[in-house]
Image (spheres, rainbow, N blue to C red):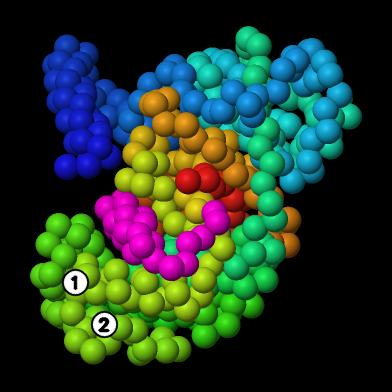
């Protein structure tokens, strides 16, 4: 069981306990006061839960985030004078440098019901309701404003306390290099790195799985479960090849390996054995490769084995010879297919005659907070919750212009998996949150990823 599954299990257990206690209290109120009062209180409690307490947050908001950064990257002489962030010594900061500021954020009483955020220049970065701990603001892109002494930080529904700490990292222009994005599923490359790969002079997109499971949307069209799974896989295979064209990536540089969703972990455990699709009743991956621009080594048998995954990856790596590889960060992103995708690439690189100069990790899912990045579409991305400082992390934040954000949103809109409407209960919850908690919907689409992924930054981690 993964850590996220353990946290979710504990969250559901606590929720069931709270529900039982609440029902008992309502019964007592109905007996002692009035029969109708429990009905009214139950409705009000449900509305309050959906509006303010429905976030999947598997840690206490008063916990400090715990990052370990290189001491050489920290800048001395940083202070907060009123709402102005100042440097005691003038520093030559590169405009494209990644800047991270650690500071304690404490919510006001209103910040327990409305999302607390920090406004900086024309950006706004949001944190957990009831936050009371050290958080890490992303100041990337604001180096000139900071160097000029004109950067102001203002808390909204929160206050900034204590002495700030600032780190800076310079990095080359990755868009001037050959970039390969590894996507466990169609849309992962766009969610994590559309801005980067759309600017790169030469980009490759490699998608590992067809993403054919959980096809209930297609079953409602009258297809049986197997047919629905197969058409979903075909559509997502098409998406993985076609959507990058929107960013100028030629079809010849887009490859769909077509392995089956949520089977990579089993394949890795038994590298020689084939593992069939859970829902599509297929043991051959080749139906999902029909749009590929060139053959792959495992096209000879189409067997879904780990050894075939490695052979296909080595073939593509040697063909593309990427200088920068972008793949999931196995520590931050707990999705089993994402973890296996990273491990497959690293294993494929062992002993290979071509090696990249840079490997960047991304996180499209988190263990602890399903809402991260918090806040609205178009806002900046503060650093995610991390509570284990044993591993040194090196953030790399790349800016996106408004035009690039809109192009990214259009690319996501083309992805079939992000098009179906949310379940009715989720739509009601979001309406209550807009009305009562002040949360704005994304102008680009209903799916939560339009809010989470279309931002002024793309955040990576150098591995």
Quick one: 332 or 57, which is closer to the camera?
Answer: 332
Residue 6 in the image: above or below residue 270: above
Asked if residue 109 lies left or right of residue 271, the reply is: right
Quick one: 49 or 410, which is closer to the camera?
Answer: 410
Q: Residue at x 33, y 75 (%)?
A: 312
Asked if residue 300 lies in the magenta stretch, the reply is: no
The numbered disc on residue 305 is: 1
The spot of residue 102 in percent (x, y) is 60, 23
Asked if residue 342 lies in the magenta stretch, the reply is: yes
* Marks 2 and 1 in Cβ contact (< 8 Å): yes
The N terminus: image quadrant: top left
Say if residue 407 shows up in the picture: no
Residue 189 in the image: above or below residue 101: below
For mark 2, what is the residue? 298
Residue 98 in the image: above or below residue 401: above
Q: Residue at x 22, y 42 (%)?
A: 2
Q: Residue at x 32, y 46 (%)?
A: 334
Q: Which residues are magenta?
A: 335-358
Tag 1's secondary structure?
loop
The spot of residue 153 in percent (x, y) is 73, 24
């Amino acid at each position: 069981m993964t850590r996220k599954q353990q946290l979710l299990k504990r969250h559901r257990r606590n929720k069931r306990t709270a529900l039982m206690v609440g029902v008992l209290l309502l019964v007592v109120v109905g007996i002692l006061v009035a029969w109708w009062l429990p009905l009214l209180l139950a409705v009000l409690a449900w509305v309050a839960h959906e509006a303010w307490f429905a976030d999947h947050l598997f840690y206490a908001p008063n916990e400090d985030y715990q990052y370990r950064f290189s001491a050489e990257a920290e800048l001395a002489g940083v202070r907060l004078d009123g709402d102005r962030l100042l440097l005691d010594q003038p520093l030559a900061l590169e405009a494209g440098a990644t800047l991270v500021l650690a500071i304690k954020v404490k919510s006001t009483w209103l910040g327990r019901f409305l999302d607390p955020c920090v406004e900086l220049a024309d950006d706004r970065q949001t944190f957990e309701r009831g936050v009371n701990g050290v958080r890490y603001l992303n100041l990337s892109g604001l180096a000139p404003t900071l160097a000029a002494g004109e950067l102001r930080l203002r808390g909204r529904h929160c206050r900034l306390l204590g002495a700030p700490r600032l780190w800076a990292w310079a990095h080359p222009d990755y868009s001037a290099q050959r970039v390969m994005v590894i996507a466990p599923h169609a849309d992962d490359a766009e969610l994590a790195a559309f801005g980067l790969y759309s600017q790169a002079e030469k980009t490759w997109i490699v998608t590992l799985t067809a993403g054919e499971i959980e096809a209930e949307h297609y079953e409602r069209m009258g297809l049986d479960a197997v047919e629905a799974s197969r058409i979903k896989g075909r559509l997502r295979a098409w998406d993985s090849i076609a959507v990058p064209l929107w960013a100028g990536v030629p079809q010849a540089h887009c490859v769909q390996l077509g392995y089956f969703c949520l089977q990579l972990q089993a394949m890795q455990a038994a590298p020689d054995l084939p593992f069939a699709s859970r829902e599509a009743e297929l043991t051959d991956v080749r139906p999902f490769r029909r749009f590929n621009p060139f053959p792959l080594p495992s096209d000879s048998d189409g067997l879904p084995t780990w050894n075939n995954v490695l052979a296909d990856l080595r073939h593509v790596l040697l063909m593309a010879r990427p200088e920068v590889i972008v793949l999931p960060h196995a520590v931050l992103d707990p999705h089993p297919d994402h973890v296996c995708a990273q491990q497959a690439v690293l294993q494929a690189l062992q002993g290979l005659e071509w090696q990249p100069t840079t490997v960047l990790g991304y996180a499209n899912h988190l263990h602890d907070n399903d809402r991260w990045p918090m806040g609205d579409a178009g806002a900046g991305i503060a650093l995610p919750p991390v509570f284990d400082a044993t591993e040194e992390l090196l953030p790399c934040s790349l800016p996106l212009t408004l035009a690039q954000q809109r192009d990214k949103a259009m690319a996501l809109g083309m992805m079939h998996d992000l098009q179906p409407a949310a379940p009715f209960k989720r739509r009601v919850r979001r309406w209550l949150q807009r009305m009562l908690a002040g949360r704005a919907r994304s102008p680009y689409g209903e799916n939560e990823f339009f809010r989470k992924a279309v931002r002024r930054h793309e955040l990576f981690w150098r591995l």
